[in-house]
Amino acid sequence: MYFSFLSKIELWTYFKIMFLIFVAVVMVGLIIKADNWIDKISNKEPSKITESEIVKIAENLMRIQNVANEQRFTNLLDKLEKSNSDALNTAKAYAKATDSRITALGQTVASLKSTFSESKPSDTYVDPLSDAKSYENYDLVRNDIGKEELPVGWVKYHPNWKGEDKLFQYHYPLDFYSTIVKTERPDGSFSYTVENWLQNDYIPYSRGKKYPLNMKSIEFEERLLKEKSFRFNPRLGLGGGITSVSVFPSIDISLFSYGRTEVDMDWRFLILGIGASGFSEDNTEVVGTFSPVMYNVGNFLPLVKNIFLGPVISVDTRSSVGYGCVLSVPF
């Protein structure tokens, strides 16, 4: 009889454990369904932009207006993979090492649309004793690049040398600059403005001057980070609650979250907190709180984007148990 009774207790315990696991799984499923339903309700009107719009502002300045599109992003990704892009390969390795994702890609093409200009010797030396020491200096410049000639090097020519290379040449180090500026509209569309130019800061004559490059094409694509997942994500929060027993400010910590990233959360789970109520010499009580789940109601608010609301159970130092709700802002 005794062992039979123990077996019944163990079976009842196992049943309760299995039932709690079943309830937890059902709650997770319901939360995901509710989250998808909430997303559909809270989605803003989509952007009217369906195809990328490119504007050439100046010879070396272009802008692309676009909206996130998974197919176009994949096409550009394939294009960069086929070209064996070092930038893409490096970014992939970094993303793998840091558990991150590539969400934006871009490529611009610019050309140096210019030619070497014919020039007269900038310096001529005739040695009166040895013709072999006579020389002519020529400055190498490119024209048709902006409004000024770009110095790229020099050549020293020894006209009377025999049986040897008559030319000595030197090319200046040229710096390539690319400025990229992103803007984003409330409807989710975005734009990238790109400027490309060369600079020769090696010689005083051209130092600090911009020599524009001819922009030929521009591509920028983004993908939305839509996938949400559960993760172990301890986050501190600051807020307050109201229960059937008291009103109190509190600080809390949640153990798990559900959302796109560790910061972009829609749900927080298993939140433990501590606060105080009363705030008088004779009536100050420490309050411990527990909230099983909180939702980010900031998804529906115009001014605050990250504020969570959920049910709470509180117990104070007088052993008074209260039931109510709590607000929390994670940081």
Image: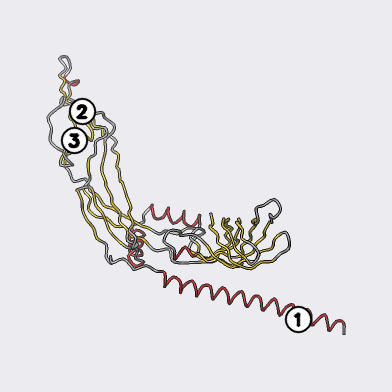
Q: Which residue is mark 3?
A: 141
**In front: mark 2 or mark 3?**
3
**Residue 277 appears in which quarter of the rendering?**
bottom right
Front residue of this view, candidates 87 and 217: 217
Q: Which residue is mark 2?
A: 156
Front residue of this view, candidates 196 and 109: 196
Q: CA distance from mark 2 to mark 3?
A: 14 Å
Q: Which mark is residue 11?
A: 1
Tell me which numbered mark, 2 or 3, is placed earlier along the sequence.
3
Residue 22 in the image, given as x and y percentages of width and height: 63, 78
Q: Which mark is residue 329?
A: none
Taking the spot 18% from the left edge, 31% from the top edge, the residue there is 139
The amino acid pointed to by label 3 is Val
The amino acid pointed to by label 2 is Lys
* Secondary structure state at the residue bearing disc 1: helix
Please identify the residue farthest to the right as the structure is shown. Answer: 1
The amino acid pointed to by label 1 is Leu
**Are the residues at dot 1 and dot 2 in contact (C-beta closer than 8 Å)?**
no
